[in-house]
Amino acid sequence: MQTIPSVERLQKGPVAICECLQSIPCNPCADACPRRAITVREINDCPVIDEDNCNGCGLCMTHCPGLAIFVVDYTYSQDQSIVRIPYEFFPLPQVGVSISALNRRGECVGMAQVIRVQKSPNKTNVLWLAVPDELVMEVRAIRLQEEQ
């Protein structure tokens, strides 16, 4: 299930979005949220994010075993937004490199620049990608140039 925040909320700064597609017993994202912005009503329900309470910290991303949560920030620049995605592969991309930005089907939809690589104490790191505004709701993965 996915709920896109309102345009007004997106313009306020970073916010998490959940694209959890499976109804399975799972709630680590809700447990990880320090603001209690994520709720799972029944254990098999998909998480619901209270977008007004979410500050986009991304802790939920590093705890989601399904890699189903990402953070968007439309306030990065005039024509680019940030998409933060969970990333569990090695090697980690270097800050400043341009990489292929992939959609949910693994198709290249454009280029992204790695702005930050946020290392996590668990296995899920977070990539901060600058993408054109029109791609922010499309980009969900990357392909390093040497992999092509």
Image (cartoon, helix red, strand yellow):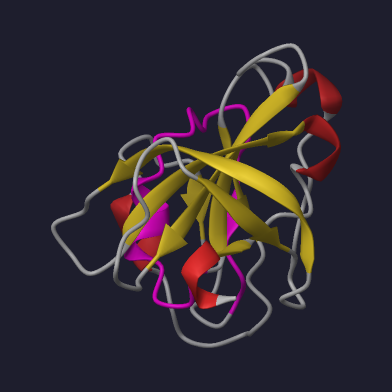
Residue placed furthest toward the top: 78
Foreground residue, 131 or 61? Answer: 131
Foreground residue, 127 or 110? Answer: 110
Q: Is residue 102 visible?
A: yes
What is the quadrant of residue 34 in the picture?
top left
Q: Position of residue 44 (x, y in %)?
A: 55, 83
Name the residue rendered at 60%, 20% in the picture.
13
Name the residue rendered at 84%, 25% in the picture.
7
Q: Is residue 139 above or below residue 42?
A: above
Foreground residue, 56 or 53? Answer: 56
Name the residue rendered at 55%, 52% in the picture.
70
Give the position of the C terminus as an image quadrant. Answer: bottom right
Q: Is residue 49 above or below residue 147?
A: above
Q: Which residues are magenta?
A: 45-67
What is the quadrant of residue 16 in the picture?
top right
Q: Is residue 89 above or below residue 75?
A: below
Residue 82 is covered by the magenta coloring: no
Residue 51 is covered by the magenta coloring: yes
Q: Is residue 30 visible?
A: no
Foreground residue, 121 or 129? Answer: 129
What is the quadrant of residue 108 in the picture?
bottom right
Q: Position of residue 65 (x, y in %)?
A: 39, 76
Q: Position of residue 38 (x, y in %)?
A: 49, 50
Q: Position of residue 82 (x, y in %)?
A: 59, 33
Report whether 21 appears left or right of 134. left
Report whether 40 appears left or right of 50. left
Magenta stretch secondary structure, dominant: loop
Name the residue rendered at 51%, 33% in the picture.
54
